[in-house]
Image: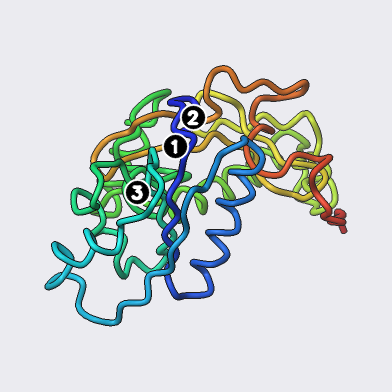
Amino acid sequence: LVKKRWTKWFLVVGPAPEDRLYSDAIKRSAKRFNIDIVAEKTWEHTFDARRTAQADVAVFSQVEDDYDVLVVADEQGLFGEYLDYRTWLPRPVAGTQGLTATGWHRTHEQWGAVQIQNRFKDQAGRWMEEQDYAAYLAVRAVGEAATRVGSNELPAIKDYLFSEKLALQGYKGNPLSFRAWDGQLRQPVLLAAPRSLVAVAPIEGFLHPKTELDTLGYDQPESHCQWTKK
């Protein structure tokens, strides 16, 4: 969104606790990239949105200030799907619905991803989801570490996993690795619409002294995590 210079956001937050957590992450990103959240509303309707979305979304989405994009926090999928094409102003939707940030998506085919997509579909009879990809990476990371160190001992495997030697291939162009300060996996993030891949982050132009993957999420100076390998 910053790359497109969509710097004025209208934030719509659902009633669930996880929606609030998602909105907190959105606000942190907005502050980091100097984004102006011009309006924020909480979705509190309890009716069946399928029957009333056409009229009520238009009324709900009227705000005083103009905005470039509507950002929705609806982790449970209760109403977010009904915002597209129904807002008072014709604006794109992003967040948990619309343009979403995800670890994996069925439309991703670059860097050999089409091969694992097809193999998974042949085996499971369905498309690979984000959770499937995470499980695959976990197993592959342990296998990669065990092969490289030539041992099945846990301490040796863990030391390699969190060292700078690890360069895990994950069908995303850049080698993946684990952050030493919080144990989080460094990986590109897919930005996708329901049926198309729009972009892969980190986006060109966002620089970092060590790795551009650390422009995503909490960087080491920003993190208060005290995680240690045990």
Q: Which residue is mark 3?
A: 128
Mark 1 against mark 2, which lies toward the viewer? 1
The amino acid type found where label 2 is placed reads: Lys
**Closer-to-camera residue (141/104):** 104
Please, which colouring scheme is shown?
Answer: rainbow
140 sits left or right of 102 in the view: right
State which tag comes first along the sequence, 3 or 1: 3
- Give the residue pinned by disc 1: 190
Identified at 67% across, 29% down, the residue is 167
Residue 31 lies in what quarter of the image? top right
Q: Determine whether the residue tagged by mark 1 lies in a helix, strand or loop.
A: strand
User: Residue placed farthest to the front in the image?
Assistant: 64
Which residue is depicted at the point 38% across and 52% down?
64
Q: The residue under label 1 is which amino acid type?
A: Leu
Task: Give the side of residue 69 with respect to residue 183, left or right.
Answer: left
Q: What residue sits 66% from the left and 39% below the top?
A: 32
Q: Which mark is residue 172?
A: 2
Callout 3, which amino acid?
Met
Residue for point 14% across, 62% down: 54
> Along the horizontal axis of the image, is 2 left or right of 63?
right
